[in-house]
Image: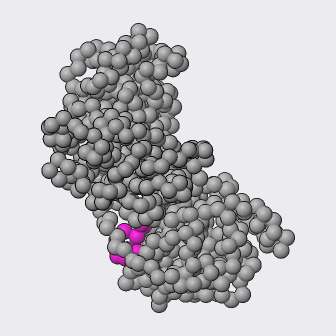
Amino acid sequence: MCGIIGYLGKKDALPILEKGLERLDYRGYDSAGVSVLDGGSFNTVKKPGRMDNLKEALKQTSMPGSLGLGHTRWATHGEVNEVNAHPHWDCRQEIALVHNGIIENYRPLKEMLIKQGHVFVSETDTEVIAHLIESYYEGDLEQAVLKALPQLQGSYALMVASKKEPDKIIAARMLSPLILGIAKDGYYLASDATALVDEAALVIYLEDGEVAVIRKQGFEIKDFKGLIKSKTTSALSWSGPAVDKKGFAHFMLKEIYEQPEVIKKNIEIYTEKDTVDFSIDQRFFQDIDRITIVACGTAYHAGLLAEYMIEEIAGIPVTVDTSSEFRYRNFVPEAKTLFVCISQSGETADTLAGLRLAKEFGFKTLAMVNVENSTIAREADKVIYTNAGPEIGVASTKAYLSQIIVLQLLALKLTHLYRKQLPGFYYRYFTELKKIPLYLEKILAEAPVIESLAEELQKASNFLYLGRGINYPNALEGALKLKEISYIHAEGYAGGEMKHGPIALIDKELPVIAISPAGRVRDKMLSNMLEVKARQGKIVGIITEGDSDLMQACYKTIPVPFAEEHLSTMLVPLPLQLLAYYIAAKKGCDVDKPRNLAKSVTVE
Ligand code: M6R
């Protein structure tokens, strides 16, 4: 979950590390630190808290040198303070190291190293790696790293430098992402591509069990035995402006506003004359008896939506699991299963583990991923990119919508292969689908109304989100959005389940966000809403414009344009996101970097 960056080249390392860490700090922002090697010694500055604290401290110091390591931390072992911030050191402060991941056997290693006389200063698991490398160091950093790596259990992407070998960085990967960027001025290492945008035209994605040996005059990729491997380079397709706020107060708001474009882009890329084309051989989608979807958080909610869509229109049974449950429950595999994993980052540890398990079961595996060439994208049999562009805000918005549209298209593709539909079905579906970007623009134009509603509701300490049928997962997502960025407790519930418990919560203080666009369950939702109203509940309805019965049941409404039930799932998230955003912003919360969270969950 931490962000790591390294540079070795012709330029001064510090500005590169600073820029890289600013782009990476969405991976974790408990502390940040840099070390730059100047001739024979390292200069290091580390600060707890946000990147701004480090930047402020760096203003007071000069750090020349063209080899540097940087780190932004999401704390796992040891509290948030300067000592536990990376880079970490060996006893003699000759070896500097940054690490993303968790060393699971750090305790026995630490005990062994203490017995050998090593002195530890931090509470981190990472520090053992520096001392372990020191214990093997006999003048050759690469050899020392190669001896240390087999002793480490857990996950790591790490970068190491020694002041005795000032022209070298050694980096290694096991279960945590690591990328080498190749530029005219030198070599960049980073935990994800965002840090390399505009810096390195070409990149190499390291795989588990690989080591990069970087020198100013060249690099080699090796396995853990030190044998050279040949690797292919790829071009980075994202460009700089995409990772800027473009005048919006927060990345989250900018990303909310990008959603009409995201939908348009996916329609453009994947549809042609009322058919879906993922550029994947038709045979891959044939001979499927069941679909198993695995994902985490917001992506899991997209998976739940897909269950409704695929079962209803394609008629194929679907099961959906959170990745962390899937990997440890005794799932009973069935032949002819298509395994689909959904992930914005393509690096989520549990989802990756789920994918690897699915491969062991012999399933066909399909990844739906936003970040190109991420580990999940590379390891699945086939990948469908969701084309949302870089999502920087920790709270997922445009990535969620991109997952929904692509899953809709998958449902259509499967329908075409597995079920006959009435004449005109596809024409009608695609005609309506193409209107969604326009409808989203219409909802965005109502943002000031949602903002003033947020003003009224921001003091509530609990929220309930209700939905039914295909929009039930959107109730879960609405509650997740609010709680993660505003720290207000929120629960998502199926409207029909109200009477089985949560109705006890209703009083005149509790805002109930009732998701009830036109569709088969609209009348059922109306009954649930009236039950809430009868108990003086404060209902905010997300309803189809002009639905006067529902308006009467609500304290306030946020209308969305009429859309066919399946397509309404792409309209509903937008008001939910805006409501959560404005409430959090008005409460003064750090919207883009909510406390305790990180964008990419690369540890279990
Ligand atoms: O990168 P992924 O889509 O695999 O991430 C999964 C979740 O961590 C993520 O969706 C998380 O729940 C969102 N950031 C919440 O807004």
Q: Quick check: 29 left or right of 523?
A: right
Q: Which of 282 and 34 is in front in this view?
A: 282
Q: Nearer the viewer, residue 490 or 375?
A: 375
Residue 11: x and y, percent?
Answer: 43, 82
Please state, as top left, top right, bottom left or bottom right, where the N terminus lies in the image: bottom right
Q: In this view, does 125 lie above or below 528?
A: below
**Picture quarter containing residue 450?**
top left
Q: Which residue is drawn at 32% across and 14% down?
A: 553
Question: Is-magenta flag for residue 199?
Answer: yes
Q: Which residue is drawn at 48% across and 49% down?
A: 335
Q: Quick check: 134 left or right of 535?
A: right
Q: Which residue is drawn at 51% across and 65% down?
A: 177
- Residue 451: tell me if it is visible: no
Q: Is residue 235 above or below residue 568?
A: below
Q: Which of 87 and 110 is in front in this view?
A: 110
Q: Residue at x 49, y 30 (%)?
A: 491
Residue 44: x and y, percent?
Answer: 60, 72
**Picture quarter containing residue 122?**
bottom right
Q: Quick check: 327 left or right of 590?
A: right
Question: Is-magenta flag for residue 552?
Answer: no
Tell me where the magenta segment starts and ends, as one range. 193-203
Residue 117: x and y, percent?
Answer: 83, 74
Q: Residue furthest right?
A: 115
- Residue 417: tell me if it is visible: yes
